[in-house]
Image (cartoon, rainbow, N blue to C red):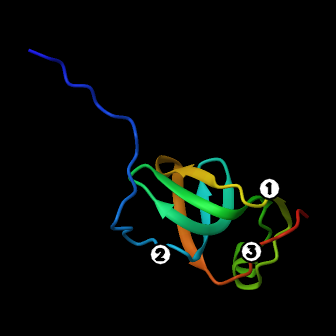
Amino acid sequence: MSKSTKSTKSTKSTASGPYTIGRNIFIRTVTHHLIGRLEAVYPAELVLSSASWIADDGRFHETMVSGKFSEIECFPPNQHVIVGRGSLIDATHTDVALPTTSV
């Protein structure tokens, strides 16, 4: 009897659930806040482009309305950021402009 091995490779989901591919998304994880454009949804990961790490989002409501963050660090251009879905606290699509410079 042969043993079957479980693949650890993620495959892209064709059903993205509540996520909309191509929209900007603000994500809070257990340790970080991120913003970026949602490029792909996998069973265990979200993939962002034009992403930034939000070190300090300031007053949350004001930030979500204005898109002005107190402190941000942008990832290098054309770099995808992979976020483990198991670390998500919450996520929201947003129409604010994505940051292009660190502040």
Give the residue pinned by disc 3. Answer: 98
| Quadrant the C terminus occupies | bottom right
At x 45%, y 71%, the residue is 19
| Quadrant the N terminus occupies | top left
CA–CA distance in space, label 3 to label 2: 16 Å
Q: Give the left or right position of residue 21, taking residue 32 as reference.
A: left
At x 58%, y 51%, the residue is 82
Nearest the eye: 80 or 53 = 80
Nearest the eye: 94 or 82 = 82
Dividing the picture into quadrants, the one containing residue 9 is: top left
At x 55%, y 73%, the residue is 92
Residue type, numbered disc 1: Pro
Q: Residues within 10 Å of mark 1 (few under 14, many from 20)?
A: some
Give the residue pinned by disc 2. Answer: 20
Q: Give the left or right position of residue 98, taking residue 46 as reference.
A: right
Nearest-to-viewer mark from 1 and 2: 1
Q: Secondary structure at mark 2?
A: loop
Q: Residues within 10 Å of mark 2 (few under 14, many from 20)?
A: some
- Which label is found at residue 99? none
In x, y percent, where is residue 25?
60, 71
CA–CA distance in space, label 1 to label 2: 23 Å
In x, y percent, where is residue 74?
80, 59
Q: Earlier in the sequence, mark 3 or mark 1?
A: 1
Nearest-to-viewer mark from 3 and 1: 1
Give the residue pinned by disc 1. Answer: 76
Q: Residues within 10 Å of mark 3 (few under 14, many from 20)?
A: some
